[in-house]
Image: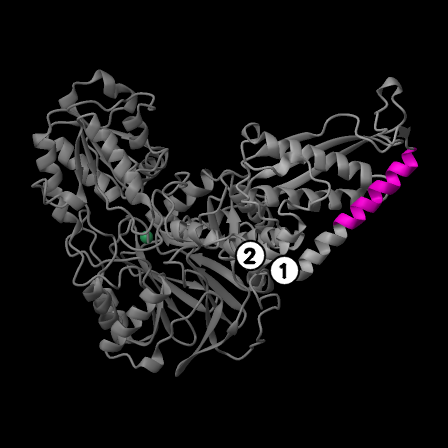
């Protein structure tokens, strides 16, 4: 996948990826809040609540409730407050559940629900069977042997502090001893990004083409966390041009050259005792690729003639009609731009698209310009590609980015990351003036050699960046407006269109057809396309993650499900618990209020005024009434309850009480954290004065406590009745 005009997608691998996040972020945040009144309160509840005077719990009220809260005089029951809080917890849970781990996926707690020792071939998508084709990972299991095809990550996860998701490997625990190999189709992160997490836990050699293995080594080197002691990365480089076949357990593996948007892309051919499986990986059938490494059509046809049990074909852009134009159609556009540009030229593109980098370098050399590269991920991949001899760069063409300010404007082309407007990308930093060496200026030309990833929200990021550039009188060329600008196309997709997907089916002539690596709906379209090509409907399956597809030479069926899910990973590479993420969502939506109380153990009285700390809740300084009211509530709670219950219970009650109070005042349910410091021993002159004069007499502390207890009980009773009414 990657850099494609289709749903959830990975832009810019190795970039922090935050802003370039793909997918349904917008829709998801909409769903975080239920429409209308947040806790779904019903009108009758308000009516009932108002009985107590329209201002909270009545009786003990200070003037804290006297407005400014937007409460509109409603009284809110404890039940409502608790339900509101539950609701926000549940909303958060629902959001997290989209990426639940295997143990959290409902009905998944059990082990694989079949014990199957029959000589059937089992194919299980641990990832890549939904979500637009991300964290792609397909397990093939036969008796005592297994291999994994692709092992990617999902950069489209839109959760606070989460960088990406990887497939949950709970099931692999139970078949660990069977695992013989990882076989990788190509070096995009959604196909290799899970390897540094998963291979150390389930070691086996990684098979791939020369460029793919280079990418694998690159991501292991750049991985933030240390590998476990004794772990050794084992790779097997295969030649995709010679039809080399390697024996792996009872299987034979072959890689077949295919065109995509990264060099070294391959189709996996896995010959098993039951029959031949083909996994296309990501592909298009470019008749005229820039590196002249065309898809090995002849071999695919040959394999098809020999017989293919099942074709597992990538489904990213099945909805796109016709054929994807050749990469070579954009070469002239770059030559034209470079020829006409008055000053410096900056080209933004996806960081692993080395063929396009080569093309731009060619066009720059043609126009008599030097080339500087920038963007960490792009430079890293370029270095690897140069080391492996994948690029042909004339000596003296590359110049360091730091030299660019000292060069003549019409002598340089800068190739960099940032075609999706990602905030931390090289291009964006140059545009905003935050770049160490380069600030964009009038007469510069910027070319965005990509299209915005649909449904990613990147559209508006790009829009903002282009606005900023145009304001500075920078010339901007975007692929989507190339007609307006009177220039040829500036980007082509790395994925096939319908006719090419059909070609793949017709070349390989599979008995069974299983669409993979795409959204469920795209895979369904792919099935319809396969049926049009003559595959019987009964020989197709739209499988979901975790489902076991069992094959005999004559039959394909789903026979069960294994534990599956998503494991979330943060910027450091560490796994983050779903519970932590859930708290982050509540924090993000509702904020936090911490209450710090210092209480004298002996007297049970507050020694200092309560400290109230809030973050992301409301701006407390502007809400003095709420603050004062909260302090009154806290004092009363301490006086009435501290000496009556044990500390844990006191904290729980305090938490409930404050949650209720804040919800009543603000209609929000922040996370409330009570911190109670109990100070032992009479602290001399610091003895709090809580004696109350009533009828000219000083009450004993016992009497005060009794009265307060009574009041507190009454208050609670009232609240409980309200609950009953609301319910
Ligand atoms: Zn790809």
Does residue 204 appear in this view?
no
* Picture quadrant of residue 7: bottom left
SS state under label 1: helix
Residue 534: quarter of image: bottom left
Q: CA distance from mark 1 to mark 2?
A: 9 Å
Image coordinates of residue 287 in percent, x first then y, are: 15, 57
Pick the front one: 556 or 554: 556
Q: Please tell me the numbered disc located at residue 665.
A: none
Farthest residue in the front direction? 695
Which region of the structure is painted magenta? 700-715
Residue name at image x 10 percent, y 37 percent: 335
Labelled disc at residue 41: 2
Residue under numbered circle 1: 726
Quadrant of image for the N terminus: bottom left
Choose between 210 and 406: the one closer to the eye: 406
On the image, the x and y values in percent for residue 620 come to 57, 31
Picture layout, residue 378 above or below residue 38: above
Q: Are the residues at dot 1 and dot 2 in contact (C-beta closer than 8 Å)?
A: yes
Within 8 Å: ligand 1 and the Cβ of disc 2?
no
């Amino acid at each position: 996948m990657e850099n494609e005009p289709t749903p959830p997608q990975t832009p810019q691998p190795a970039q922090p990826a935050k802003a370039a996040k793909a997918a349904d972020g917008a829709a998801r945040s909409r769903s975080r809040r239920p429409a209308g009144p947040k806790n779904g309160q019903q009108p009758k509840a308000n009516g009932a609540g108002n009985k107590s005077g329209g201002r909270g719990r009545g009786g003990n009220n200070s003037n804290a409730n006297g407005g400014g809260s937007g409460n509109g005089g409603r009284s809110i029951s404890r039940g409502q407050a608790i339900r509101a809080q539950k609701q926000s917890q549940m909303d958060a849970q629902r959001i997290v559940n989209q990426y639940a781990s295997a143990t959290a996926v409902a009905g998944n707690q059990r082990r694989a629900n079949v014990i199957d020792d029959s000589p059937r071939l089992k194919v299980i998508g641990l990832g890549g069977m939904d979500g637009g084709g991300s964290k792609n990972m397909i397990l093939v299991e036969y008796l005592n042997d297994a291999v994994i095809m692709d092992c990617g990550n999902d950069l489209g996860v839109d959760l606070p502090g989460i960088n990406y998701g990887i497939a949950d490997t709970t099931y692999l625990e139970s078949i660990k001893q069977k695992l013989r190999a990882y076989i990788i189709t190509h070096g995009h992160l959604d196909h290799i990004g899970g390897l540094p997490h998963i291979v150390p836990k389930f070691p086996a050699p990684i098979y791939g083409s020369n460029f793919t293995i280079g990418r694998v080594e690159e991501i292991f080197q750049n991985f933030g966390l240390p590998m476990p002691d004794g772990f050794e990365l084992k790779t097997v480089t295969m030649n995709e041009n010679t039809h080399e076949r390697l024996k792996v357990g009872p299987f034979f593996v072959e890689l077949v050259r295919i065109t995509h948007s990264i060099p070294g892309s391959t189709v996996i051919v896995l010959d098993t005792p039951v029959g031949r499986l083909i996994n296309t990986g990501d592909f298009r059938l470019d008749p005229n690729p820039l590196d002249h490494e065309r898809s090995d059509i002849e071999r695919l046809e040959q394999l098809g003639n020999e017989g293919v049990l099942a074709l597992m074909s990538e489904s990213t852009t099945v909805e796109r009609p016709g054929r994807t134009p050749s990469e070579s159609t954009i070469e002239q556009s770059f030559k034209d731009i470079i020829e006409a540009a008055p000053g410096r030229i900056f080209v933004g593109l996806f960081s692993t698209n080395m063929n396009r980098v080569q093309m731009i370098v060619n066009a720059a050399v043609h126009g008599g310009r030097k080339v500087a590269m920038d963007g960490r991920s792009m430079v890293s991949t370029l270095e690897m590609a140069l080391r492996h001899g994948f690029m042909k760069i004339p000596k003296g063409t590359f110049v360091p980015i730091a030299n660019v300010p000292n060069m003549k404007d019409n002598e340089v082309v800068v190739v960099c990351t940032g075609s999706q407007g990602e905030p931390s990308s090289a291009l964006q930093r140059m545009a905003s003036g935050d770049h160490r060496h380069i600030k964009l200026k009038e007469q510069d030309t910027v070319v965005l050699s990509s299209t915005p990833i649909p449904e990613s929200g990147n559209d508006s990021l790009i829009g903002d960046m282009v606005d900023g550039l145009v304001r500075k009188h920078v010339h901007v060329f975007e692929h989507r407006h190339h007609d307006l600008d009177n220039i040829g196309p500036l980007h082509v997709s790395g994925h096939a269109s319908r006719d090419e997907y059909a070609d793949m089916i017709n070349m390989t002539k599979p008995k069974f057809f299983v669409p993979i690596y795409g959204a469920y709906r795209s895979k369904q379209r792919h099935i319809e396309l396969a049926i049009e090509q003559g595959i019987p409907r009964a020989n197709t399956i739209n499988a979901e993650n975790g489902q076991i597809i069992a094959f005999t030479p004559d039959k394909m069926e789903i026979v069960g499900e294994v534990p599956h899910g998503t494991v979330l990973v943060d910027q450091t590479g560490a796994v983050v618990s779903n519970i932590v993420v859930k708290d982050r969502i509540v924090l993000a939506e509702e904020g936090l209020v911490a209450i710090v109380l210092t209480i004298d153990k002996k007297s049970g009285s507050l020694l200092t005024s309560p400290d109230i700390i809030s973050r992301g809740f409301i701006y407390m300084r502007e809400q003095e009434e709420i603050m004062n009211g909260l302090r009154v509530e806290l004092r009363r709670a301490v006086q009435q309850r501290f000496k009556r219950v044990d500390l844990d219970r006191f904290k729980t009650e305090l938490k409930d009480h404050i949650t209720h109070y804040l919800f009543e005042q603000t209609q929000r349910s922040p996370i409330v954290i009570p911190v109670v410091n109990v100070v032992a021993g009479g602290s001399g002159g610091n003895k709090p004065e809580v004696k109350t004069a009533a009828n000219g007499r000083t009450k004993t502390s016992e009497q005060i406590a009794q009265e307060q207890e009574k009041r507190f009980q009454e208050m609670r009773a009232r609240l409980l009745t309200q609950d009953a009414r609301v319910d």
